[in-house]
Image (tube, rainbow, N blue to C red):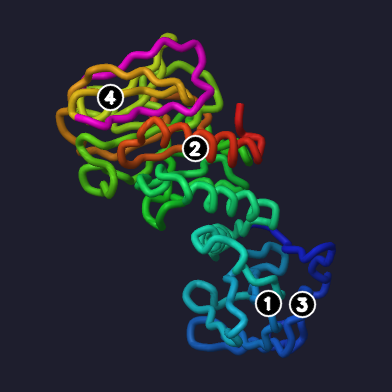
Amino acid sequence: MTAIKPTVGNVVKSAVYPAIGSSSSYWTPLITNVVITPIAGGNRITFTPLTGYQTEIWYSLDGAAYAMLGRYAESVNSVDHTGLYANIVDYQLRGVLDDASYDSDAVALFNRMGGATLGEYPDDTRKGVLNTLFTTGKTKAFWSKLDAAWLIAAHGAGSAKLNIISTSFSLTLSEALTFEVDRGYSTVPGYIITGYNPTLHADNYSINSASLGVYCRTNTSGTGAMIGTGTAGNTSYVMWLSNNGYAAINGSAYVTTPTLNVQKLIVGRRLSNTTMAMFLNKVKDEEAKASAAIPNAVVNIGLNSDNQFAFAFIGGGMDDTDISDMYDVIVDGYLASIGAKI
């Protein structure tokens, strides 16, 4: 578990770790009448919630490293913690201001980041950044066209793997890869697996309306796709090789765009059966390239493309306005706010 000690203002956890069964209160604001009772396969935590506050419950297996069990509405006064966590040595509770001021999808992401598996609940500053991303992004047409999107530049290595559009398609790694906080994963020597196959999993993605792309923070030429299902045959990808950018969507024909630098938002886009485009940030190169079929393969990130990636997405066909808005919201918005934009 991540060694994290939550704070409320300048108040931090006390040095004393109350034993299981204690009725004392821990972090402030005070949650009173806390009682831990053993039950089959775990513990029951009962408490008196604070008016106007939600209750956060954190747990530890060693009394030092903590992960958040969850955040609960003011109406909740009892939580059962079962499964793999019967051997908890300490619980800590605190009241937190209601998340009603945040977008509901942003709150759901906060809780996934802070769940028992990751233990990476975002601090208030990060929550504000993520909330702005959701509230701004959801006003733009591109957001509803996304099948999956990953903020690979994140505050934690686990949070970087989460699909922010749904709970499906969390990223996995082909092998141990280097993660840099607020910068992303470097695909050296391996690659990132999305688990998304456009033939099997498409929602918005279709034969003549499809897009995928990444934000790349480094500038290494490679023989493989920055994101895609491969670079041969019927495929979808974007790549950079020998000072040329390449993009193919649902076919073998590709757009070629000369560029000396790919530290940019790089997108392949198809809106019809006859043409497709490649974008470098907001600059478009569109050519006559026919579609063939949706590829039946998993989309990977950085396979034979040794770069650091901060963002990736796949979805339906993004028009020019969508690409511009995505750049503004993701790159000039989220990535710039955490220092990941080049």
Figure quadrant of residue 323: top left
C-alpha separation, residue under disc 3 versus residue under disc 1: 15 Å
Mark 3 or 2, nearer chain start: 3
**Vertical comparison of 7 with 207: above or below:** below
**Vertical comparison of 14 with 180: above or below:** below
Residue 151 visible at all: yes
Start and end of the magenta stretch? 252-272
Residue type beneath disc 1: Tyr
Q: Are marks 4 and 2 in contact (CB under 8 Å)?
A: no
Judge depth for marks 3 and 1 and give the one in front. 1
**Which quadrant holds the N terminus?**
bottom right
Q: Are marks 4 and 3 in contact (CB under 8 Å)?
A: no
**Which quadrant holds the C terminus?**
top right
Residue type beneath disc 2: Phe
Q: Mark 2 = which residue?
A: 311
Q: Mark 3 = which residue?
A: 26
Judge depth for marks 3 and 2 and give the one in front. 2
Residue type beneath disc 4: Met
Q: Depth check: 167 or 257 in front?
A: 257
Density class for disc 1 (Cα within 10 Å; few <14, some 14-19, many ≥20) is some
User: Does the stretch in magenta take in 288?
Assistant: no
